[in-house]
């Protein structure tokens, strides 16, 4: 999924650009692709959960994929932290970006985190109902 305005790339499941707040599209028309922006990092994961963030970074490091994590340093600004919503409501979740040539591979790796988190949540809900 791609933002038609800022050209940020999101993994499957996202429907709106976090920064531009407009609907994502599956692909840009060929004439809209800016070949000069090919070296700009793309967002492949966003979370406010420090455990999932640490796991994501660890997985990318093990796969030898260079990444950047924007917003990580301000998550606990003014003591807001991740209380209640899972991230600092002022700054939003931490966004992990990689280079375009690594985006697809990184997104596939990081999809595993969501699948594992969903399994853990399902197990916890099942335990609570018993």
Image (cartoon, rainbow, N blue to C red):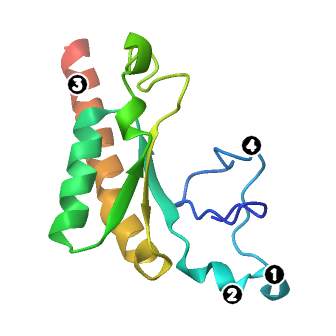
Q: Is residue 119 among the parts visible in the rendering?
A: no
Q: Secondary structure at mark 3?
A: helix
Q: Position of residue 62 (x, y in %)?
A: 15, 68
41 left or right of 31?
left
* Rendered residue at 63%/44% (across/down): 18
- Residue 78, horizontal then vertical, whole percent: 42, 13
Q: Quadrant of the C terminus?
A: top left
Q: Give how far apart the Cα atoms at labels 4 and 2 are.
A: 24 Å
Residue at the disc numbered 1: 29
Vertical placement of residue 49 versus 114, above or below? above
Marks 4 and 2 close (CB-CB < 8 Å): no
- Nearest the viewer among 19 and 124 is 19
Q: Residues within 10 Å of mark 4 (few under 14, many from 20)?
A: few
Q: Earlier in the sequence, mark 4 or mark 2?
A: 4
Residue that label 4 marks: 21
Give the residue drawn at x 43%, y 27%: 87
Judged by depth in the image, the label closer to the viewer, 2 or 3, is 2
Q: Quadrant of residue 94?
A: top left
Circles 1 and 4: CB atoms closer than 8 Å: no
- Residue 57 vertical placement versus 80 (above, below): below
In this rendering, position of residue 130 left or right of residue 20: left
Which residue is label 3 attached to? 124
When the figure is inspected, residue 101 is found, relative to residue 80, above or below; the finding is below
């Amino acid at each position: 999924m791609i933002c038609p305005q800022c050209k940020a790339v999101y993994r499957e499941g996202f429907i709106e650009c976090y920064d531009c707040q407009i609907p994502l599209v599956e692909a840009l028309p060929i004439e809209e692709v800016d070949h000069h922006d090919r070296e700009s990092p793309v967002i492949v994961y966003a979370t406010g959960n420090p455990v999932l963030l640490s796991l994501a970074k660890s997985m990318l490091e093990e796969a030898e994929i260079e990444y950047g994590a924007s917003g990580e340093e301000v998550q606990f600004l003014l003591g807001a932290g991740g209380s209640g919503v899972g991230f600092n409501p002022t700054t939003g979740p931490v966004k992990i970006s990689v280079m375009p040539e690594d985006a697809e591979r990184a997104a596939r790796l990081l999809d595993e985190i969501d699948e594992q988190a969903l399994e853990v949540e399902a197990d916890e809900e099942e335990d609570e109902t018993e």
